[in-house]
Every structure is written in C-alpha cells, then in structure tokens.
Amino acid sequence: MDQTAPSADAAHARGAVRSRAAVEAYLLLAFTMLCWGANSVAARLAVGQLSPMVVVCFRWAIVAAVLGVAVRRQLPAAWPQLRRRWLQVGFMALAGFSVFNALYYVAAHHTTAVNMSILQGAVPVLVVIGAFFLHRTPVGLLQIGGIAATLIGVAVVATGGHLATLAAFRLNVGDVMMLIACVLYAGYTLGLRNRPAVSGLVFFTAMAMVSFVSSVPMLAAEVIGGTVQWPTVEGWLVLAFIVIFPSFLSQLAFMRAVHLIGPGRAGLFINLVPLLGAFLAVALLGEPLAPYHLVALALIIGGILVAEVSGRRRAI
C-alpha cells in the first residue's frame, strides 16, 4: 500500500493548522500592540488627573473584581492547579503586571523618553535569549538579523531620527528601573508557555487578584508620602480605557498569541509598541509626524517579517 499520499495529506493538514494559528496570532498581536501603544497616550493624559500608583492599584482592583464575578464558578475547579503552582502565578503577576507597571510609571520621573524607548526595545531580545536557554528554542542568523533591524527601528524612533544621540546614552536611576522592568516582563512572557493547565481567563483572574493585592502597599506608600492624587472626572475616563484595553483585552490576546506561536516569536512584536505609540500621539495628541517615523516603520516591520519567517521555518 502506498503511504506517500496519506503522509503528504497529513503534512498538508498540519501545515494548514499552523498557518491558521499563525494568522490568528498575528491579528491578536497587532491588537495587543495597538492597545499597549495607546497606553502611552493614556499615560500622558493621566498626568495631573491621577497619580501612578492609583492607576496601578485601581486598574487591577477593577479587573480582578469583574473577572472574579465572571469566573466564580470555574475558580473552585481550577484552584488545585493554581495552588500547586502558586509561586509561578505570583511571580508572573508581579513581573508582568504590578511591579512592571509601578517601575514604568516611576521611571518616567527619573529618565528621558529616549532612554525609556531604547530600553523597552530590549524586551524581545531578552525573550528570545531566555527562550533559547530555558526552552532550547533555536535562533538562526536570519532571526538575529531581524531582531537587529527592529532594534535599529526602535532606536530611530527613540532618538527622533538622530542616532548620534546614542553616544550620549547614560544610565541613571530611571534607566535601572526600566531595565529591571524589561527583565521582569520578559520573564512573564517566557512563563506563559508553561502556565498552569487552567483556562486563560481563570489564569488571568488569578494574576489580576495577586496584582491588586501586591499594589495596595504601593498605593499606601504613595498616600503616606503625600504624593497621591485621586482621579478627576477625566482621570476616571483615562482609567476606564486603561482597564478595558491595555489591562484586560490585550492581556488575554497576548496570552493566546504566546500559546499559538511561542514567546520568542510573539515577544518580537513588542518592538511595535514605541512606533504605534508615536503614531497614536500624532493622531490623538496632534504631535508632528516626521520622515524618520516612516524609516522606523520599514525597519521594524521588515525586521519582524524576517525574524518571523525564519522562526516559522525553524519550527516546521
């Protein structure tokens, strides 16, 4: 009996499944990065309307409350799995949500936008490196070249098209905070591959609850320090946007995308965030659009495509 045809059909079917998964992941990642890019605009709108730790604490309090009601019947069944992996759940919540956000907002008071943008570009690189060491995910020369191209694109955005300013790049307290935040978020992304065997919604609920609890002492410190600012009317509107999109829908989309194509490939798309944030600032805040934005767009999109095609070939 000829086994060639069935084998070919099976291979074709597997390829079709991988292609559908990749398309779904791309759409989810595009939505996620758009939400995260818009978060930078929301953060600017929040200045003078509510203080950083109020944002961090309130966003996770609202998300945890809504999700807790939504999955109240699923939590008891999932509790044994979550309890066995409580250290992982706790670390991922701290790394990807509460502490990352706290460090990000505080760092903005101690460093420049140029430094923050450049350092955020380190997240995909850290994810790829971490995936190589932790999961033995292969990294090819084309993938390395794609990563380099996206980082150059991020640097172009960060420096306003004047790469010579990189010569004056220096670390300060804010930069150190951003570096720690980037390492933590890379760790969170890597952890998504081996998260507890519960539904994404239940897992996200558990992390949101941990994030809220861990953010309460941060808010208390802000209150004691006399720097707290409770939300104004506009502050509540900004907070509502942050809760619905960057904190809720985008996180679910990102977890699903990582499940579909892995942390190394999904993490590369984070390089789109600085660029999308810049374009949204042009559209929503009236900031000028310069030619270097288009150069950066070509570098970042091109780098992602090269690295993604290389990653897919090595995954087959």
Image (cartoon, helix red, strand yellow):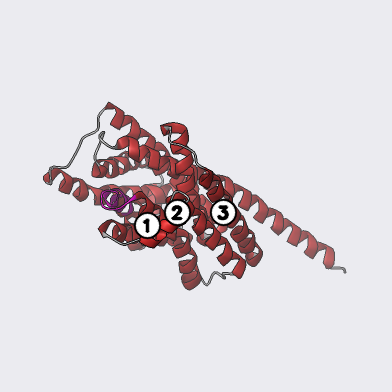
Question: Tag 2's secondary structure?
Answer: loop
**Which residue is pictured at 32% across the width and 41% down the height?**
59
Of residue 234 and residue 292, the one placed in the foreground of this image is: 292
Closer to viewer: mark 3 or mark 1 = 3
Q: Do the residues labelled 3 and 1 touch (CB within 8 Å)?
A: no
Q: Are marks 2 and 3 in contact (CB under 8 Å)?
A: no
The Cα atoms of the two marked residues, 3 and 1, are separated by 41 Å
Residue 86 visible in this rendered orientation of the protein: no
- Decide whether the magenta segment is chiefly helix, strand or loop: helix
Mark 2 surroundings within 10 Å by alpha-carbon count, few (fewer than 14), some (14 through 19), many (20 or more):
some
Question: Tag 3's secondary structure?
Answer: helix
Q: Where is residue 293 in the image (x, y as percent from the top left)?
A: 51, 45
Of residue 113 and residue 6, the one placed in the foreground of this image is: 113
Mark 1 surroundings within 10 Å by alpha-carbon count, few (fewer than 14), some (14 through 19), many (20 or more):
many
- On screen, residue 176 above or below 60: below
Residue at numbered disc 2 = 198
Q: Where is residue 148 in the image (x, y as percent from the top left)?
A: 53, 62
Viewport quadrant of the C terminus: bottom right
Q: Give the range drawn in magenta.
A: 100-112
Q: Position of residue 12 (x, y in %)?
A: 75, 58
**Which residue is pictured at 28% across the width and 41% down the height?**
55
Residue at numbered disc 3 = 299
Of callouts 2 and 1, the N-terminal one:
1
Q: How many marks?
A: 3
* Residue at the right extreme, as displayed: 1
Q: Do the residues labelled 2 and 1 touch (CB within 8 Å)?
A: yes
Residue at numbered disc 1 = 82
- On screen, residue 145 above or below 246: below
The reply, left or right, for residue 84 in relation to residue 275 is left
**Which residue is pictured at 26% across the width and 50% down the height?**
106
